[in-house]
Amino acid sequence: MELSELLAPGAVRVVGHLTSKKRLFQEIGEIVAAVHGLNASFAVDGLQERESLGPTGVGHGIALPHARLQSLDRIIGVFIRLEKPLDYDSVDRQPADLIFALFAPKDSGVDHLKALALVSRTMRDAGVCAKLRANTDSAKLHAILTEARAPQVAA
């Protein structure tokens, strides 16, 4: 599995300022609706339901919201770079500015976990994050993400 399989060029955006996590989820919902034809409110509801189990802010300015949805047939991603970091209730209490959301089919099982692990490994790469924070062009951000080689887990 590669990030290029999960992340369409149109699903990468730079957003100036959002006032809340709820507004961020609405923005993500609008993107998946526009790019993948997914119902935006289903996407938002899925993200909020997962978030109610515990925050998906993993620290260092990174959040990985995710949800499993009945209406999907494959795993898809959305990446947002926030120009102004958002209070996200992250584990390190730092605001988040790099948001990579994943949506997976309800019955995706281990594939959802593999995709989440791939995104997590990629976003833990300080070099990748520095490049993402240094760019404001969506096409460049997509290229950085899809060209990044996440460190492989030892088998």
Image (tube, rainbow, N blue to C red):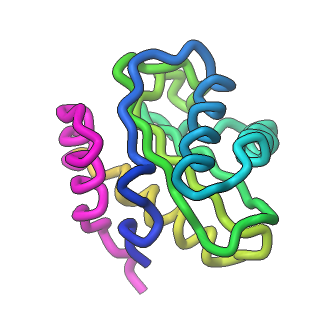
Front residue of 145 and 53: 145
- In this view, the residue farthest toward the bottom is 155
The residue positioned 39% from the left and 19% from the top of the image is: 16
Is 16 left, or right, of 106 in this rendering? left
Compared with residue 43, is residue 90 higher up or lower down, i.e. above or below?
above
Name the quadrant containing residue 84: top left
Considering only vertical position in the picture, is 57 above or below 4? Answer: above
Is 62 placed above or below 139 here? above
Toward the viewer: 132 or 151? 132
Horizontal and vertical percent position of residue 91: 57, 32
Q: Quadrant of residue 37?
A: bottom right
Q: Residue at x 47, y 39 (%)?
A: 99
**Residue 70 image point, x, y percent:** 81, 65
Q: Is residue 49 magenta?
A: no
Image x and y of residue 93, in percent: 53, 22
Residue 34 visible in this rendered orientation of the protein: yes
Quadrant for the C terminus in the image: bottom left
Taking the spot 23% from the left edge, 53% from the top edge, the residue there is 144
The residue that appears at 22% across and 64% down in the rendered structure is 147
Q: Is residue 134 left or right of residue 119?
A: left
Q: x%, y% of residue 82? A: 40, 26
Q: Quadrant of the N terminus?
A: bottom left
Q: Nearer the viewer, residue 39 or 50?
A: 39
Relative placement, left or right, of 100 versus 2 is right
Where does the magenta region start and end? Answer: 127-155
- Does 153 lie within the magenta span? yes
